[in-house]
Image (cartoon, helix red, strand yellow):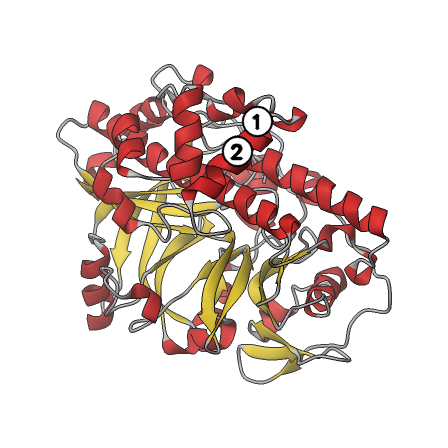
Amino acid sequence: MHTTLHKPAPTRMIATGEATAILPTETTAPIKVIGTEAIRDTFDDVCLQQAVNSRLAPGVTDVVLNPDAHLGYGAPVGCVMVSPTHIYPGPVGVDIKCSMSLLQLDIPADVIEDRQTRRALISAICQRTPTGAGKGQRSAKKSRLVNRTLGKQLVVEGASESVCQQLGIPVEWADRCEDSFHLGHDETRDALESRLEVLLAQRHMSNFSDKMSQLGSYGGGNHFGECEVVHVGDDDRSRSVAETFGLRDGKVAFLSHCGSRGFGHNLASGQFKTLQNKFSKWDIPLPAGDRQLVYAPLGTSEADDYLDDMALGANFATANHLLINALVLEAFQEVLPGTTGSLVYFISHNIARKEIMDNRPTWVHRKGATRAFPAGHYALRETPFADTGHPILLPGNPRDGSAVMVADPGAEQACFSVNHGAGRTLGRRHASRVLDQTTIDDEFEQHDILSNCRFYPKDEAPAAYKDFEEVLRSVKTAGLASEVARLKARFVIKDASKADD
């Protein structure tokens, strides 16, 4: 997953404000950049070149570089790419609809102060939600078993009432999703059913039943579950918005990060291979010569197939998150009887969504970027968040915490998007070479943060990521979003396996 510089590094960014800049290209409107000077210094030449390549690709009208931007698959992780005419698999990536979700519990923080209680919670959660690449229901004795029939239903329907009931997911949680289900290219479920039958006859999908057994699991790499204590801001707006969101100051919450697991990876890999073969067969020029920037014009059979595959993967990811939250709540209830919980929100950061921009439908590709609709946005009508904007869930790191934010009107300048987290500053291999394990583990001990890992993975240590406070300052100063609450970690569910993100 490495882009090489096919030409000299792009023109340097030009500051337009304390936390905004533009990156010029030679032939198009410039790329919008969100980030303070300190954050802009974290963008290396390859990341900037990927942004330029993406902006110059056919049909692309806008590219936004967020403060967490770094090397990605064709397009940088931490970018937004907009096109009304073309669909791009690269700016969605191999983990279709990788997302965040937050479960608010009614437990006061002092209930989990005892380390033995936290250890019992870690054990109860790991008995239900396995971690690690390829791990599934057979790896967790108290997980939910998903057979082939239910698997076929959930990838077509997403979090439908029937699917939720069969999986033991509270039906009302579907109302707290950015998208509780996705339809096919023609906005029907029939298209997904037809496409699934075609896929199941193909060799790369012969392991469908095995992939369905990964439902309710985190995977490896940067995916995690994290027990938090909620600290709502002390201003009137934060308190009012937090009440709408369902956040409870001083209470325990649980933050999850994962996606479509091996099923989404199968779908995305199949699409990349198919499109790359067609580009080669038809001798179509690749944007900047990058095979990771293959595309399909909307209305073609290739675009229809990709949109259907993306929807199938996204429906799996939705059911996966909701099931994990149901299992986590069940684990808390086992250790702390009488616990209740409600879903705050579930929101994606690896997806292409059809949205209205400049009074026309367009496809907004968010690669490591989070939707940020403020109060009054048309898409929030008849939702609980019409008057506030929806929750934005931004993971930082266990040491510095994570944030719940809400969009401000200025989010429009970034195509109604913000970053999806802190963003890497050290590559995985580099982090594993230069970071010290003892220092990492001592830091967790000093902050009284427990983990299920014997040794917390070096490539996921806080030092491998950008300064979260500076990332948040970029977002706030640019006028994109405001902080509603900070989440402070008490324990982390993680895996040291090779990344599958």
Picture quadrant where residue 284 is located:
bottom right
User: Considering only vertical position in the picture, is 402 above or below 445?
Assistant: below
Query: Residue 38: horizontal and vertical position, in percent?
Result: 60, 70
Query: Residue 197: horizontal and vertical position, in percent?
Result: 53, 30
Quick check: 384 left or right of 400?
Answer: left
Query: Residue at horizontal 28%, vertical 26%?
Result: 166
What amino acid type is highlighted by mark number 2? Leu
Query: Residue at horizontal 23%, vertical 53%?
Result: 247
User: Does residue 456 appear in the picture of this structure?
Assistant: no
Query: Residue 218: horizontal and vertical position, in percent?
Result: 46, 33
Quick check: 215 left or right of 337?
Answer: right
In contact (CB < 8 Å): disc 2 and disc 1:
yes
SS of the residue under disc 2: helix
Instruction: Please name whichever residue, 93 or 250, is drawn nearer the observer in this view of the structure.
Output: 93
Q: Residues within 10 Å of mark 2 (few under 14, many from 20)?
A: some
The dot on residue 200 is 1
SS of the residue under disc 1: helix
Picture quadrant where residue 26 is located:
bottom right
Quick check: 86 left or right of 385?
Answer: right
Residue reaching furthest to the bottom: 16
User: Considering only vertical position in the picture, is 368 above or below 454?
Assistant: below
Instruction: Please name whichever residue, 50 or 291, is drawn nearer the observer in this view of the structure.
Output: 291
Quick check: 437 left or right of 447?
Answer: right
User: Does residue 392 appear in the picture of this structure?
Assistant: yes
What amino acid type is highlighted by mark number 1? Leu
Instruction: Please name whichever residue, 215 or 235, is drawn nearer the observer in this view of the structure.
Output: 215
Residue reaching furthest to the left: 338
Q: Which residue is mark 2?
A: 196
Alpha-carbon span between mark 2 and mark 1: 6 Å
